[in-house]
Image: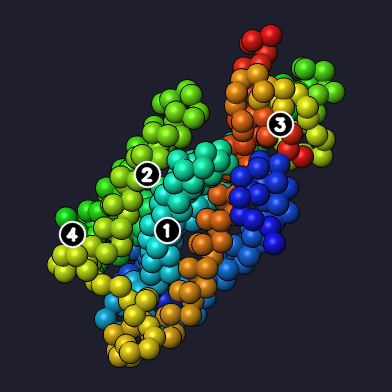
Amino acid sequence: MVSIWEYANPRRFMATSGAVLPWVAAIAALSLIGGLVWGFFFTPDDFRQGATVKIIYVHVPAAIMAVNAWLMMLVASLIWVIRRHHVSALAAKAAAPVGMIFTLIALFTGAVWGQPMWGTWWEWDPRLTSFLILFLFYLGYMALWEAIDNPDQAADLTAVLCLVGSVFALISRYALVFWNQGLHQGTTVSTVGVGVARNEGVADVFLYPLMVSLAGFAFLFLALVLYRTRTEIRARRVKALIAQERMA
Amino acid sequence: MVDLGQYAVPVLSAYGGTIVLLVGLVGASVWQARRVARRLDAIEARRGGSGGGRTGGKTGGKTGARTGARTGDKTGDRAARAK
């Protein structure tokens, strides 16, 4: 059994990620296209929301993965802080733009859905506001990486920022539980299951394409993080070689 | 074609915006990866080519291993030895 810490070795990471990346990317493309086509073309309108229900196939997966991306960055940052594995710091750095775009998609599609349904593009609702703050944290995190030349120092400081931002990532997910107010409805996907009345969850006709689309976003995130981490490792090597040339 | 009724504009703009953002993200990632790869190839070619290939490429590299040792950058060290 290979230990997960083996992948802290860039050589091992590059070999393994190079092998799995085409498969992950293919699964991401298939499930994402399949989920969106299924949701857009082959699902009925909702009796209250009409055709706007089709927006959930992009909005919900993007919002879930926006928070999950930050939590992945948190785990990677903690591994860096505790065990000083450079690949984990670079993986956190690689994930940030992906999470930022997912957050932007969630904010944009939410506003587009909210205008006809709520009668407003934006409301200072707990969940919407915490998502906006999460978006700003993503921008700040990326800016901090770019602002510091020393990579280890940048990894240290961004790890601290990631730790602080995790509070808002969790608030984004559980805002309605904490405050129980605002326009945004509560969670619906996770209410499907044992002990939940059928009329409280999402109907199967909407749920299945939503799950496929969610899988597509999750695999797309994984593929992009692997791909971008490989780029970051190469970029780190470029820096090391340039530094050596300057010292020579 | 799907009949979106009075909600055609919000639904199509939500899907359109999402696709543009995702394609932009993938495109930017590929562009950045190629730029870094070209730069790494150029540096290694300048150094004589015998020192090793791109990280993750087919050729190994001792050059970066020395770099890592000198600069104290463990990632540069390990990445340089990566195949």
* Picture mark count: 4
**Separation of disc 1 and disc 3 at Cα?**
31 Å
**Separation of disc 3 and disc 4 at Cα?**
49 Å
Give x and y (percent) for residue A148: 43, 25
Nearer the observer: mark 4 or 1; the answer is: 1
Quadrant of image for the C terminus of chain A: top right
Q: Residue at x 79, y 21 (%)?
A: B45
The residue pinned by badge 4 equals: A125
**Separation of disc 4 and disc 1 at Cα?**
21 Å
Mark sitting earlier along the chain (4/1):
1
Question: In this rendering, would B28 be left or right of A169?
Answer: right
Give x and y (percent) for residue A49: 29, 77
Nearer the observer: mark 3 or 4; the answer is: 3
Q: Are marks 3 and 2 on the same chain?
A: no
Q: Chain of mark 3?
A: B
Residue A68's label in the rendered image is 1
Task: Report which quarter residue A58 is drawn in.
Answer: bottom left
Q: Are marks 1 and 2 on the same chain?
A: yes
In the rendered image, the vertical position of residue A239 relative to residue A197, given as above or below: above
Q: Chain of mark 4?
A: A
Mark sitting earlier along the chain (2/4):
4
The amino acid sitting under disc 2 is Cys
